[in-house]
Image: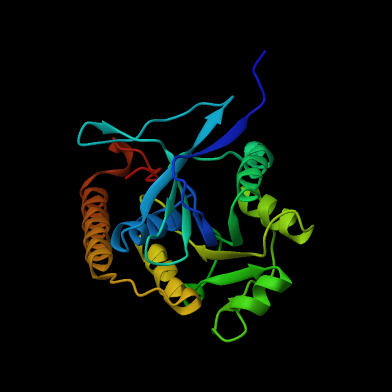
């Protein structure tokens, strides 16, 4: 019989962890994950721990032959910020266990606020490429009284974002803001990640040079535009009855 999922946070640093915790998870489009990863790289956050997942399939990311934990905890040596980055997808049915593990660890720290970056694909118009907030009252009064960030007009939060928000509403988690933005598969949505970096500058006054990510976003946009042109050219040349490639382009 399979064991229930569990998440344990292991911290190797004796330094106190305090301030806001910025959470970037692996969702469709990878917007929050990309933004938080870019933040910790360019502001030189230091890894201070990791999260161990038990009772469900794990992954081990590798770079230049070196393995790393898929869920990592970081702290900034220059500012009072911490970050939680997860390259491992947390299923909706495991969100409760994930929240249990993270909040048990938070109780042993001086972390006093949560910001969750939750990019999701949902129907939207061209004018809705923006970031919207879902925030508990204390977080809203603390962080969103001045910045011009729009509230989400409706809908539901599920998974980790929904679970942590519900816990914060019940007083079981620090004040929390979830930031929602539309994302677009296939591949990483770097435009959505850039929107999150802009928001971090607006809400948290973090000065982040995003030129490198903007260049990558432009390259990716050109790649998919050229790929779409090649597919259109193939369709124009091929007789519909002899088509030998799939209509589903989800993985192109």
Question: Residue 209's x, y, as percent?
Answer: 28, 72
| In the image, residue 88 above or below residue 233 | above
Which sits in the foreground, 100 or 75?
Answer: 75
Tell me where residue 146 sits by quadrant: bottom right
Which sits in the foreground, 49 or 185?
Answer: 49
Residue furthest top as drawn = 1
Query: Seen in the image, is 27 located left or right of residue 228?
Result: right
Question: Residue 247's x, y, as percent?
Answer: 38, 43
Which sits in the foreground, 152 or 145?
Answer: 145
Which sits in the foreground, 252 or 37?
Answer: 37
The C terminus - image quarter: top left
Q: Residue at x 64, y 42 (%)?
A: 95
| In the image, residue 132 above or below residue 227 | below
Query: Seen in the image, is 19 located left or right of residue 176?
Result: left
The reply to whether residue 90 is in sight is yes
| In the image, residue 126 above or below residue 19 | below
Query: Seen in the image, is 162 located left or right of residue 118?
Result: right
Q: Residue at x 28, y 36 (%)?
A: 242
The N terminus - image quarter: top right
Query: Seen in the image, is 114 located left or right of residue 197?
Result: right
Q: Residue at x 22, y 48 (%)?
A: 234
The reply to whether residue 189 is in sight is no
Question: Residue 190's x, y, as percent?
Answer: 35, 61
């Amino acid at each position: 019989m399979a064991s229930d999922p569990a998440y344990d946070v292991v911290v190797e640093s004796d330094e106190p962890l305090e301030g806001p915790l910025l959470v970037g998870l692996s969702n469709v489009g990878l917007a929050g994950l990309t933004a938080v990863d870019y933040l910790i790289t360019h502001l030189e956050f230091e890894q201070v721990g990791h999260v161990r997942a038990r009772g469900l399939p794990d992954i081990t990311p590798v770079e230049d032959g070196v393995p790393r934990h898929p869920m990592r905890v970081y702290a900034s040596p220059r500012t009072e910020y911490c970050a939680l980055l997860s390259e491992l997808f947390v299923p909706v049915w495991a969100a409760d266990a994930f929240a249990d593990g993270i909040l048990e660890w938070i109780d042993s720290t001086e972390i006093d606020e949560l910001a969750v970056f939750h990019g999701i694909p949902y129907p939207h118009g061209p004018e809705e490429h923006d970031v919207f907030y879902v925030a508990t009252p204390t977080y809203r009064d603390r962080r969103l009284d001045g910045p011009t960030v729009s509230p989400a007009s409706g809908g539901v939060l599920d998974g980790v974002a929904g679970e942590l928000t519900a816990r914060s509403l019940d007083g079981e988690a620090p004040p929390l803001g979830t930031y929602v933005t539309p994302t677009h598969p296939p591949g990483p949505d770097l435009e959505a990640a850039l929107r999150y970096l802009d928001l971090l500058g607006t809400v948290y006054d973090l000065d982040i040079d995003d030129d490198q990510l903007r260049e990558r976003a432009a390259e990716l946009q050109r790649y998919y535009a050229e790929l779409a042109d090649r597919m259109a050219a193939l369709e124009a040349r091929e007789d519909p009855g002899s088509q030998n490639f799939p209509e589903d382009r989800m993985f192109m």
